[in-house]
Image (spheres, grey):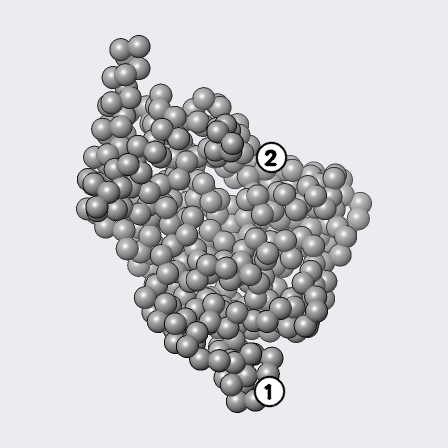
Amino acid sequence: MSAADPIYLDYNATAPIRQEVMALVMEIMATVGNASSVHQAGRKARARVDTARQQVADLVGAPAKNVIFTGGGTEADNLALRGFGPRHLIVSGFEHGAILAPALLLDRDATVVAVDRQGRIDLAALEVALAASDGPTLVSLMLANNETGVIQPVAEAADIVHAHDALLHCDAIQGIGKIAVDINELGADLLSISAHKFGGPQGVGALVMREDRTVMAQMVGGGQEMGRRSGTENVAGIAGFGEAARLAGAELEEFAKLAILRDGLEDRLAKIAPAREVIGGDVDRVPNTSCVTMPGVRSDTQVMALDLAGIAVSAGSACSSGKVAASHVLDAMGMDRDEAMNAIRVSLGRDTTSAEIEGFLTAWAEIYRRNSAHTDAA
């Protein structure tokens, strides 16, 4: 496998923009019109936004009027935590940084709830945390973990949260487009979405509300999004978001078949390295995600070697200023730090082929054998 034949297995970072979406975005970008203008061009732009709003709402079973378009998933997460008044914040230990960073900034006493060894929230600990909160409270719990793919018991958590008169925000960014999501069935009060995770453009997302609520806008000035998020609408990006949502909703059954490729990959890795571990592999996961260790080989070494072979994956650890730190997700799960430093994330997508899986397995096996031989010689 050579760099001339690249293999992209990092769909959880971003999915390639779909051709249908790209065509629509380019068509709209070739026109002019501000969605806040009342003339014909403005009305056409407004119609594009309204259509997309309905498409996004349909994907998650929400009223269109409760969809707030944002500049991406991070902004949607921040709006959820900031937009509903001062509240005590309760989050899980494996949330994305877009939740953990603002939560700890907004509430010094924010409660971080433990997770189990499989990467699921401890519902009993959540109950205790809510019982100890004596004021307005908001709980944030992701739907599917970005590193492991593990699906959280959001509906069960919602019952507990609402029994304590608190709000539940669900960061659904890694679940939307991969599994069926209905905001009403989840019981979430707020839901974050990001277009580029399922074939839409980068830089556009949404916060969806199950019921009408007053939102304290964090972006103010023009009063767009019904006063909930000011700023001239990114009409082309929003329209692309809507089209990607429509397509993703129609293809969920097809996407589910990626579990066959994913499970086959994990089985083959076990034959190459019997001590390999699939993190979260014993519980429900989204069908495209595998977080797997290569015994004795650091994740950064794997990522770089695979990149040289033309294969894109992500590390289960993060590099910063030349220092490698264990993933906070795997740390929250209580995973041994040395083992966590050997984990990578392989995430498949709608265009992934069995031939690409074979290419990855060949390269992974060579890296493992080469590094194992080096370790044995040392």
Work out whether 230 lies above or below 345: below
- The x, y position of residue 260, in whole percent, is 27, 47
- Mark 1 packing: few (<14 Cα in 10 Å), some, or many (20+)? few
Picture residue at 28% right of the left edge, 55% below the top = 351
Three-letter amino acid code at the position of disc 1: Val
From the image, which quarter does the N terminus lie in? top left
Picture residue at 26% right of the left edge, 32% below the top = 364
Three-letter amino acid code at the position of disc 2: Ala
- The x, y position of residue 256, in whole percent, is 34, 54
Q: Give the residue number, with chain letter if any, for mark 1.
A: 38
Q: Give the residue number, with chain letter if any, for mark 2.
A: 114
Front tag of 1 and 2: 1
Q: 280 or 131, which lies in front?
A: 280
Name, please, the residue furthest toward the bottom.
40
Judge left or right: residue 3 versus residue 279.
Answer: left
- Mark 2 packing: few (<14 Cα in 10 Å), some, or many (20+)? many
- The x, y position of residue 341, in whole percent, is 44, 27
Q: 158 or 238, which lies in front?
A: 238
- The x, y position of residue 108, in whole percent, is 74, 39
Work out whether 169 lies above or below 328: below
The secondary element bearing badge 1 is classed as loop
Work out whether 328 lies above or below 51: above
Instruction: Note whether residue 267 is visible.
Output: no
Label 1 to label 2: alpha-carbon separation: 51 Å
Picture quadrant where residue 376 is located: top left
Judge left or right: residue 258 versus residue 156.
Answer: left
Judge left or right: residue 198 versus residue 369.
Answer: right
